[in-house]
């Protein structure tokens, strides 16, 4: 299990502010506290990258922007419908960004990237579809079944992403086993984390 966590860590960091916000909302924490916590975490993640002079990933900027916008709107309006709709907007924006080919390459060690290029491209689009479907489902539940929205947001996003992550992990690992490594990478390629 620690290998999967190590592989998932970059993705978790990219969306940590939004995850904190969603978890606190699902736990019925006050909207203002949840948005403030998400904002602080998103700022910390981006700040960490800047301090270490690393390029800030697109998903990290999207996460930060969505938390900032939702924080301002929540503090100004205190309208729970905005909070319920916010994940749909976030899922939609992330889904559209994920339609850009090759975005998953940053999650694969350069030594094994050529061996799993077709799988990573396929799963890049699979993630985009999942995010777009999530946007539609969240809007449907928020508008027509608002009483069910806290349970939906607490379960569906994490469960759907967890399932897709596990499927991708298994498929990419199988591809690495099927395709022989070149001499320089043969010693450690199968033990290298292959992230999604």
Image (cartoon, grey):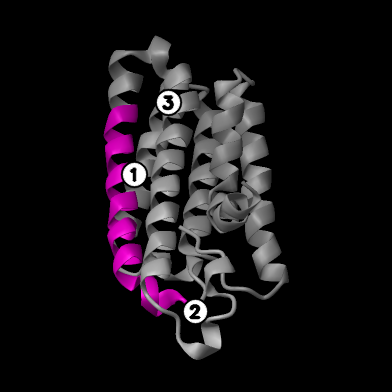
The residue where tag 3 is placed is: 84
172 sits to left or right of 53: left
Between disc 2 and disc 1, whose residue precedes? 2
Give the camera-side residue of 111 and 48. 111
Q: Position of residue 89 (x, y in %)?
A: 36, 40
Q: Position of residue 111 (x, y in %)?
A: 50, 80
Q: Name which residue lies at 33% across and 36% down.
A: 134
Between disc 1 and disc 3, whose residue precedes? 3
Q: Residue furthest bottom?
A: 183
User: Is residue 1 something one can see in this rendering?
Assistant: yes
Figure quadrant of the C terminus: bottom left
Based on the picture, tell me whether residue 131 belongs to the magenta stretch.
Answer: yes
Magenta residues: mostly which secondary structure? helix
Report the Cα–Cα distance between label 2 and label 3. 39 Å
Looking at the image, residue 40 lies above or below residue 138: below
The residue where tag 1 is placed is: 131
Q: Are marks 1 and 3 in contact (CB under 8 Å)?
A: no
Tell me the mark number nearer the camera, choosing from 1 and 3.
Answer: 1
Report the Cα–Cα distance between label 1 and label 3. 16 Å
Q: Which residues are magenta?
A: 110-138
Q: Which mark is residue 110?
A: 2
Between disc 2 and disc 3, whose residue precedes? 3
* Mark 2 neighbour density, 10 Å: few (under 14) some (14–19) many (20 or more): few
């Amino acid at each position: 299990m620690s290998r999967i966590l190590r592989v998932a860590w970059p993705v978790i960091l990219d969306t940590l502010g939004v995850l904190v916000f969603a978890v606190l909302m699902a736990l019925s924490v006050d909207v203002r506290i949840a948005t403030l916590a998400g904002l602080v975490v998103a700022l910390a993640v981006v700040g960490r990258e800047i301090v270490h002079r690393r390029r800030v990933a697109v998903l990290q900027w999207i996460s930060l922007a969505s938390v900032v916008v939702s924080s301002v709107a929540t503090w100004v309006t205190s309208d729970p419908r905005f909070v319920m709709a916010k994940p749909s907007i976030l899922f939609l924006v992330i889904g559209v960004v994920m339609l850009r080919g090759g975005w998953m390459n940053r999650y694969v060690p350069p030594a094994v990237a050529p061996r799993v290029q077709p799988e990573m491209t396929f799963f890049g689009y699979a993630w985009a579809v999942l995010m777009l479907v999530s946007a539609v489902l969240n809007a449907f539940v928020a508008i027509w079944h608002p009483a069910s929205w806290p349970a939906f947001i607490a379960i569906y996003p994490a469960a759907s992403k967890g399932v897709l992550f596990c499927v991708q992990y298994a498929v990419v690992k199988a591809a690495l086993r099927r395709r022989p490594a070149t001499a320089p990478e043969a010693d450690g390629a199968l033990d290298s984390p292959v992230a999604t």
